[in-house]
């Protein structure tokens, strides 16, 4: 089974990216046409690509960020990953996603010390 996933951004996902705020008409594209999604290897690679693209799509850039921005980015990454997996409709990818416990997929947060 070869497919490519095209995921429209959730309208509620307004976060800062390197280029500015993500707009409702922005989209995340994940290239999966070269993978066999019926194999564990193909599904694993597909899930890694989805996660990578969601992270890049939702990213607020490098460096320190307010906790609210970090939380919004994490929420966006989880939502976009879930939406991509759902839209793809590949049973092995869906199973791997569920087994990995991708929700919530929180990033570490560094707290300031006094």
Image (cartoon, helix red, strand yellow):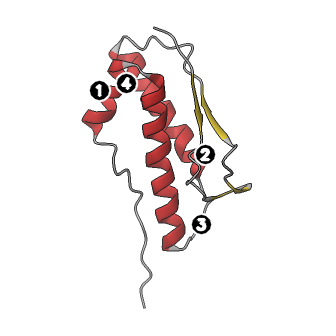
x then y, percent, for residue 114: 43, 91
Q: Residues within 10 Å of mark 2 (few under 14, many from 20)?
A: many
Q: Residues within 10 Å of mark 4 (few under 14, many from 20)?
A: many
Q: Residues within 10 Å of mark 1 (few under 14, many from 20)?
A: few
Q: Are the residues flagged by discs 4 and 3 in contact, CB closer than 8 Å?
A: no
Residue occupying the far left of the picture: 99
Q: CA distance from mark 4 to mark 3?
A: 32 Å
Of label 4 and label 2, which has the lower sequence position? 2
Label 3 vs label 1, nearer the camera? 1
- Asked which quadrant contains residue 57, the reply is top right
Of label 4 and label 3, which has the lower sequence position? 3
Residue 63 - label: 3
Q: From this view, report whether residue 37 is shown above or below residue 22.
A: above
Residue occupying the far bottom of the picture: 114
According to the picture, the residue beneath numbered tag 2 turns out to be 57
- Helix, strand or loop under label 3: loop
Task: Name the residue rendered at 74%, 54% in the picture.
Answer: 19
Q: CA distance from mark 1 to mark 2?
A: 23 Å
Q: In the image shown, does 36 or 16 lie closer to the viewer? A: 16
Residue occupying the far front of the picture: 11
């Amino acid at each position: 089974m070869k497919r490519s996933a095209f995921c429209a951004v959730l309208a509620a996902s307004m976060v800062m990216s390197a280029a500015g705020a993500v707009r409702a008409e922005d989209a995340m594209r994940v290239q999966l046409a070269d993978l066999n999604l019926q194999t564990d290897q193909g599904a694993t690679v597909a899930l890694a690509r989805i996660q990578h693209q969601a992270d890049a799509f939702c990213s607020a850039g490098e460096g320190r960020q307010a906790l609210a921005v970090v939380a919004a980015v994490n929420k966006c990454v989880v939502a976009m990953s879930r939406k991509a997996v759902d839209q793809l409709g590949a049973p092995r990818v869906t199973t791997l996603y569920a087994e990995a416990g991708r929700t919530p997929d929180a990033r570490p947060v560094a707290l300031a010390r006094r």
